[in-house]
Amino acid sequence: MVEALAGVLSAFGLSSAAGLNAYLPLLIVALTARYTDLIQLQAPWDALTNPWVIGVLAVLLVIEVVADKVPAVDHVNDVIQTVVRPAAGAILFASAGSVISDIHPALALICGILVAGTVHGAKATFRPVVTATTGGVGNPVVSTVEDVVSGTLTVMAILAPILGFILLVLIAWLIWRWWRGRRMRTPTSVAR
């Protein structure tokens, strides 16, 4: 029971991290599964541990990290990642969710797509606000914070899934509070 709960929480944490950065969680999971006993990936997800796959993930990570720091290029990257991040989330959810034998693989893939897609959608909605309010200067800072959160959430989802889930809930709550405060400061209609 505890192992199943940890698997579900890990799956949610990993797929959420993929919504911020597709390749960082995939690379961390691949390296962890290849070089430690912390993760045991079942077939077909064990293909992530192939040295060629790890190399490609590393190259794609570098490309994404650089592209996401350049104003205007980051918006093009977000459009491309609209497909990639949910797919990465699906892979991570399904690979982590394989601990649970009762869940159908298609359901795990759908959950991963929805979780990573939702996080990516929030990120893609938030980023133009940063660009508009900072003239693009804040984009590299926000992107770096997203990368750090993605990496931290991934590591926590692997090592301490319950703490990773708590971090995820805390981040969602902080974003909700920020969004709500922003909406309350926005002038509504002008009185006639």
Image (cartoon, helix red, strand yellow):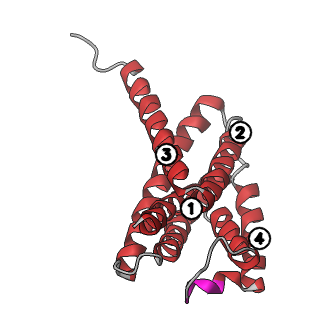
> Which of marks 2 and 3 precedes in the sequence?
2
Taking the spot 77% from the left edge, 63% from the top edge, the residue there is 62
Taking depth in this image into account, of 34 and 84 the one nearest to the observer is 34
Q: Residue furthest front?
A: 1
Residue, far bottom: 43
Give left or right: position of 186 versus 83: left
- How would you classify the magenta stretch by its main secondary structure? helix
Q: Is residue 118 above or below residue 142?
A: below
**SS under mark 2:** helix
Q: Indicate which disc, 2 or 4, sits on the residue closer to the N terminus.
A: 4
Which numbered dot is residue 58?
4
Residue at 62% across, 59% down: 159
Q: Secondary structure at mark 4?
A: helix
Residue 144, given in percent of the width and then of the height, sits at 71, 45
| Upstream in sequence: badge 3 or badge 1 | 1
Spatial CA distance of label 3 from label 4 is 28 Å
Which badge, 1 or 4, is on the more N-terminal residue? 1
Q: Where residue 46 appears, x then y in whole percent?
A: 62, 85
Q: Quick one: 103 or 78, which is closer to the camera?
A: 103
Amino acid identity at mark 4: Ala
